[in-house]
Amino acid sequence: MSDGHQRIYLDHAATTPPDPEVIEAMLPYLRDQWHNPSSIYVEAQRARAGIDDARATIARLIGARPDEVLFTSGGSEADNLALRGVLGASRRRGKHLVISAVEHHAILDTAEQLERDGAAEVSIVGVDREGRVDPAAVAALVRDDTVLVSIMHANNEVGAVNDVAEIARQVREQNAHTMVHTDAVQSAAHLGVHVDRLGVDLMTFTAHKMYGPRGAGALYVRSGTPLQGQILGGAQERSIRAGTEDSAAIAGFALAMTQTWERREADTTHERALAGRLIEELPKRIPLLAITGPRDPAQRLPGNVSCTVGFVEGESILLALDLAGIAASSGSACTTGSVEPSHVLVATGMPDDLARGSLRFTFGRGNTDADVDRLLEVLPPIVQRLRALSPVPVTEPPASWLPWLTSTVTS
Ligand SMILES: Cc1ncc(COP(=O)(O)O)c(C=O)c1O
């Protein structure tokens, strides 16, 4: 159904294709050094050495010490560990937690459960219309009993980049004992995260968003940060995260991260050029469209293009794009058959009915100008067709949409 065209992948924020060299680097750990790294014989010690090397490599890239890097299964687990671990270890000091309204659900849902269980009191800071968090607004929520502040470095839907260093600085000014965590899952590949420059105590990142495998992520934990183990039953990862390590995924993680650090400038320039062209062209070709997220490229992840299309559901567009050979995503969540607008767009203040048309295109190393051309060729007729079929008459846009719309064309 894709007219002989190659399929086009525009969903790199969901996951990235594993680099062929990364896959090669993992194979010895699956084929030969598959032994349990905790055992004492020589084969097991080789597997252990692989993990130690990977930890040292990753630590060096983010400016940390090896013993400050805890391997997890990915970003979700690292986010859960950060919140549960710090709150669990700090009960005597308090249970106040500050997060933002646009965090990934790994943070939002964990915070909600901790609060429901009486283990946390959660304050939520809002965002501006571009999805960014104001450092002063975070600091204003910090109290004497604030144990942890967790604010994401870059948002997965609209690509908004937060000034985490400034957030950390202002939080510390309010309370020198408050720990600062950042979810850097989306930013690590693009912005070159360094824990001292960011000024954080804890940081989440994951391999499969940087051309590495699924199944490996990490939580950076600054030495001296109180952290209670959450998966018990073994001495792995300093008894904080028990379980036999996935040496293959961890080795792949370290190589993927090394390559990403080496290629960052080229990758970023390439992705920013593709995304910039799409951001420029979409509003010229599709009426009643709003580009979401920061206008300033310096405050936006380089490969991110997020937008909403009035009078159409984002999900319907995605299905049509899939048939046309293009893989993309939206920010909305399908719950029991009805499509809920993305919590991120709702937090920016965008009206729900406009937010339902959200789309996200995220570029990566393998994309080309021809991919942008193809998207620009197929998307406008898809939108036009869906609007023609829409049970909601496509009329003048409601007044509440006007401040949001970017489109320069009106029909
Ligand atoms: C901002 C953010 N945090 C956390 C996660 C979860 O990471 P993982 O898929 O490695 O569990 C994601 C994944 O999309 C993300 O975008």
Image (cartoon, rainbow, N blue to C red):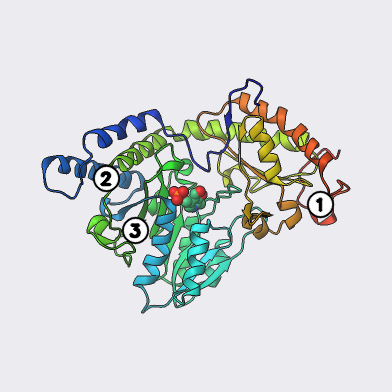
Residue assigned mark 3: 221
> Crowdedness of circle 1 by 10 Å Cα count: few (<14), some, many (20+)?
few
- The tag earlier along the polypeptide, 1 or 3, is 3
Nearest to the observer: residue 315 or residue 401: 315
- Labelled pair 1, 2 in contact (Cβ < 8 Å): no
Left or right position of 120 against 388:
left
Residue 199 seen: no
The kind of residue on which mark 1 rests is Leu
- The tag earlier along the polypeptide, 2 or 3, is 2
Left or right position of 114 against 235:
right
Q: How far across and down, in percent of the image, does residue 361 sit? A: 61, 39
Q: Helix, strand or loop at disc 1?
A: loop
- The tag earlier along the polypeptide, 1 or 2, is 2
Residue 20 seen: yes
Taking the spot 49% from the left edge, 76% from the top edge, the residue there is 143
Residue assigned mark 2: 56
Taking the spot 42% from the left edge, 60% from the top edge, the residue there is 80
The CA span between labels 1 and 3 is 45 Å
> Crowdedness of circle 3 by 10 Å Cα count: few (<14), some, many (20+)?
many
Q: How far across and down, in percent of the image, does residue 381 sit? A: 77, 32
Q: Does the residue labelled 3 lie within 8 Å of ligand 1?
A: no
Q: Does the residue labelled 2 lie within 8 Å of ligand 1?
A: no
The kind of residue on which mark 3 rests is Val
Taking the spot 42% from the left edge, 49% from the top edge, the residue there is 205
Q: How far across and down, in percent of the image, does residue 395 sit? A: 88, 47
The CA span between labels 2 and 3 is 14 Å
The kind of residue on which mark 2 rests is Ala
Residue assigned mark 1: 402
